[in-house]
Image (tube, grey):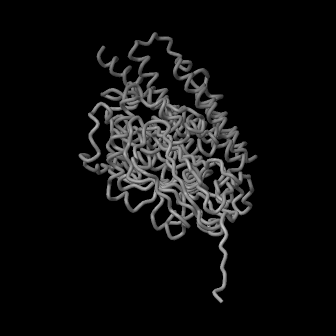
């Protein structure tokens, strides 16, 4: 009896091995799209239900081979997406299971896990196959051009630089405009990889021994915000610890190998997958979705202590929400950028971000305690010695507006053709007192004490050549200081000054300088959207006569 059982067991094992070999041969035939070989395999099979997967794979291989011949990349990616999603649902529902045996809960769970793994690995295979269509250098160039076109927050001007914005937007001729075919292929491929991203998250929920770190990151408050907010002076600059580097897998390697062995490996793979999705979304024009993924990647880097990497990711996307007038989202991203820059202890960049955290749209939505903490850091950073070598441009936390009280000779609006701007010319006579009013609107929650406020007057002839330069006394006809006290309260503040011109000429109110500790903020009139303010000093009517009589 035992010998019979042994022989029957050996027959069963050999039969299973034979079925596995035949199944593997069918897989190769289907994947290769071998028409004759696969048809012979079908004719030799009595039950076609177990062959359903191979039939679907064979049809997909034949479709893609024909689409390659007619050179239709969009339809190739679309058919791949349709094939993967269809087979994924069939595997999840057990359509190809012909045993008829009711599966246990554990077996159902294992079936779902296998379906998730198959879908994820197949999506990644499609992505690697498309790498030959989208050259890596082309995607990187387009991503770099997107980063340069986006606001990167570096609005600080060096004292020796003549540029108002050294990293300003590129001309349209220097930016890459993708053709419609590339944009459509990128759109379909980004949708496929987003499907893969969701599969990876679901696998992380079940396969990791600890809670999914990506879910934990998205569900609650970032862990770094649970710690007390340290003063700027007591922060020790952080040194980034690079994320665990994984060897690049070849085309034959399994991308899912060891992905669930630890949280760090899982996070590394997740960052790799999202890094592949972002440039495709940007190429497809889905900038908001790309920015959302970038923000998620930045949060992962922050939790890993990689503040430099998080800063590089947040800088290009920090103003995406502002374009949609989503003020709370805009403030949140500025705040997270500030959290990274303060840990790096980069005073100029941090100062620039802090000044942008306050404004007419952001101050009303900023939490009171958060705004007070940011102002405390702002008051500390403006006194940093490193800031003294920079001249800062227009900062949104303070808004300025110049006005001239009505003069006897009136005023008129004239075009300034060389700058394509309008100039409000106020006419006065020599010896007449002109009164200027400077209105400063502060969006800070608390008052600040500044060292000085000065107004620069530049002659009309010189203004057209020096208006883009940093204001200085050498280029100015007159520098008018405002009288103390120099306290700027939250809200609207008015400062008045008078000037008595003693000679004729035409002058432009060029800029306002606000010196706060070691920082100088220059509000150039040309950088504001309002018309320029000018003063035309005319000869005065004589009020006295002098009579000279000869002595002889």
Q: For the view shown, which residue lies furthest in the front direction? A: 552
Question: Is 45 on the left or on the right of 342, as rendered?
Answer: right
* Residue 255 vs residue 239, the one in the foreground: 239
The relative height of residue 530 versus residue 330 in the rendered view (above or below) is: below
Measuring 34% from the left and 43% from the top, which residue is drawn there? Answer: 377
The relative height of residue 344 versus residue 443 in the rendered view (above or below) is: below
* Residue 328 vs residue 284, the one in the foreground: 328
Question: Is 210 on the left or on the right of 316, as rendered?
Answer: left
Q: For the view shown, which residue lies furthest in the bottom direction? A: 552
Q: How many marks?
A: 0
Quadrant (top left/top right/bottom left/bottom right) for the N terminus = top left
* Residue 491 vs residue 360, the one in the foreground: 491
Measuring 71% from the left and 63% from the top, which residue is drawn there? Answer: 418
Quadrant location of residue 434?
Answer: bottom right
Camera sees residue 176: yes
Camera sees residue 270: no
Measuring 53% from the left and 23% from the top, which residue is drawn there? Answer: 91
Residue 77 pos. (x, y %)? 64, 39
Quadrant location of residue 272?
Answer: top left
Measuring 33% from the left and 21% from the top, which residue is drawn there? Answer: 6
* Residue 485 vs residue 44, the one in the foreground: 485
Quadrant (top left/top right/bottom left/bottom right) for the C terminus = bottom right
Residue 521 pos. (x, y %)? 46, 54
Residue 354 pos. (x, y %)? 42, 44
Residue 487 pos. (x, y %)? 40, 44
Question: Is 279 on the left or on the right of 15, as rendered?
Answer: right
Quadrant location of residue 433?
Answer: bottom right
């Amino acid at each position: 009896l035992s010998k019979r059982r042994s022989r029957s067991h050996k027959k069963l094992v050999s039969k299973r091995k034979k079925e596995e070999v035949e199944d593997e041969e069918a897989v190769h035939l289907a994947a290769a799209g071998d028409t004759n070989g696969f048809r012979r395999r079908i004719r030799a099979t009595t039950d076609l239900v177990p062959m359903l997967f191979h039939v679907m794979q064979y049809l997909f291989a034949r479709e893609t081979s024909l689409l390659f011949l007619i050179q239709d990349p969009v339809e190739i990616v679309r058919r791949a997406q349709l094939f993967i999603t269809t087979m994924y649902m069939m595997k999840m529902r057990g359509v190809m299971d012909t045993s008829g045996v009711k599966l246990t809960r554990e077996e159902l769970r294992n079936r779902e896990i296998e379906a998730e793994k198959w879908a994820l690995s197949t999506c990644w295979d499609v992505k690697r196959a498309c790498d030959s269509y989208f050259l890596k250098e082309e995607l990187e160039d387009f991503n770099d051009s997107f980063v340069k076109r986006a606001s990167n927050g570096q609005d600080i001007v060096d004292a020796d630089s003549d540029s108002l914005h050294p990293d300003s937007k590129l001309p349209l001729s220097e930016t890459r405009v993708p053709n419609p075919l590339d944009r459509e292929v990128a759109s379909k491929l980004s949708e496929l990889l987003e499907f893969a991203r969701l599969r990876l998250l679901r696998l992380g929920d079940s396969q990791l021994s600890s809670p999914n770190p990506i879910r934990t990151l998205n569900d609650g408050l970032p862990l770094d915000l649970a710690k007390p907010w340290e003063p700027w002076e007591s922060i020790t600059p952080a040194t980034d610890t690079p994320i665990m580097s994984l060897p690049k897998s070849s085309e034959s390697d399994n991308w899912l190998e060891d992905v669930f062995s630890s949280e760090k490996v899982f996070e590394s793979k997740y960052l790799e997958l999202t890094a592949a999705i972002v440039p495709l979304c940007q190429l497809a024009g889905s900038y908001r979705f790309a920015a959302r993924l970038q923000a998620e990647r930045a949060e992962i880097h922050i939790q890993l202590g990689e503040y430099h990497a998080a800063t590089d990711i947040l800088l290009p996307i920090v103003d995406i929400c502002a374009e949609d007038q989503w003020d709370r989202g805009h403030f949140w991203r500025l705040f997270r950028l500030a959290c990274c820059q303060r840990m790096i202890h980069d005073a100029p960049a941090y100062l620039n971000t802090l000044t942008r955290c306050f404004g007419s749209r952001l101050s009303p939505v900023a939490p009171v305690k958060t705004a007070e903490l940011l102002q405390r850091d702002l008051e500390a950073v403006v006194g940093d010695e490193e800031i003294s070598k920079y001249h800062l441009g227009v900062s949104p936390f303070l808004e300025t507006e110049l006005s001239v009280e009505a003069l006897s000779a009136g005023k008129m609006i004239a075009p300034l053709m060389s700058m394509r701007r309008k100039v409000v010319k106020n006419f006065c006579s020599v010896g007449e007192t002109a009164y200027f009013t400077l209105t400063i609107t502060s969006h800070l929650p608390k008052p600040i004490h500044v060292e000085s406020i000065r107004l620069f007057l530049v002659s009309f002839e010189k203004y057209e050549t020096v208006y883009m330069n940093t204001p200085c006394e050498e280029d100015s006809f007159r520098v008018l200081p405002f009288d103390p006290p120099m306290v700027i309260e939250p809200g609207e503040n008015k400062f008045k000054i008078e000037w008595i011109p003693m000679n004729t000429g035409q002058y432009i109110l060029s800029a306002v300088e606000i010196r706060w500790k070691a920082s100088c903020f220059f509000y150039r009139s040309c950088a504001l959207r309002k018309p320029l303010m000018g003063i035309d000093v005319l000869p005065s009517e004589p009020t006295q006569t002098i009579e000279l009589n000869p002595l002889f």
